[in-house]
Image (cartoon, rainbow, N blue to C red):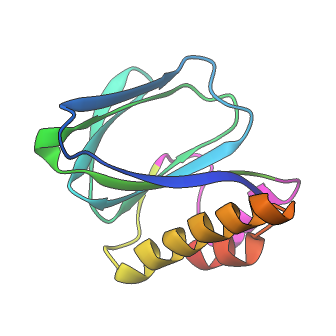
Amino acid sequence: MVVGSCGTYRLKTRPKLPTYWQKGRKDYQILYVANGKTHFWFDGKEEIVSAGHMVLYKPEEIQKYVYYLEDNPEVFWIHFTGSDVKNILAYHGISLDEHVFYCGVLPDYKALFRKIIQELQLCRLMGTRTISHRCSTIF
């Protein structure tokens, strides 16, 4: 598995932050709602996702979601790809047929995402981007 990017969003003053990928992306994305709630659209229907849930997007799948300041969202996200991603997700009980799954509100998740973010920053300086060992602990 190769991580392309990883990060976090927390709104402090901006009233909303919309994201819309009409044709999706070429990689997978998992978003972890660490605090508050976020608004996602799947098959044209809005679903409000609260803290303790993760959202999975597959490659080339429409991505539409909005963070609102009033919802106090804190979201961590990761984009990844690889020839064995389907098997890795299945091994960890993550269905490709579902978008939203509950994983709990755990400080460990936030810490793991922060470690991945830090490693990506360091890897960009050193020229490598493979950090699958950290990703497998998130799932």
Residue at the top extreme of this rendering:
22
Residue depicted at 58% across the width and 64% down the height: 117
Is residue 69 one of those drawn in magenta? no
Indicate the quadrant where residue 135 lies: bottom right
Q: Position of residue 53 (x, y in %)?
A: 36, 60
> With 1 as the anchor, is 13 left or right in this view?
left
Q: Position of residue 48 (x, y in %)?
A: 25, 41
Quadrant position of the N terminus in the picture: bottom right
Asked whether 131 or 87 is in front, the reply is 131
Asked whether 72 or 83 is in front, the reply is 72
> With 76 as the anchor, is 92 left or right in this view?
right
Q: Is the magenta region chiefly helix, strand or loop?
A: loop
> With 83 as the anchor, is 97 left or right in this view?
left
Q: How many marks?
A: 0
Q: Position of residue 69 (x, y in %)?
A: 17, 40
Quadrant position of the C terminus in the picture: bottom right
Is residue 90 one of those drawn in magenta? yes
Indicate the quadrant where residue 51 lies: bottom left
Let me know if residue 136 appears in the view. yes
Residue depicted at 67% across the width and 31% down the height: 25
Q: Which residues are magenta?
A: 82-99
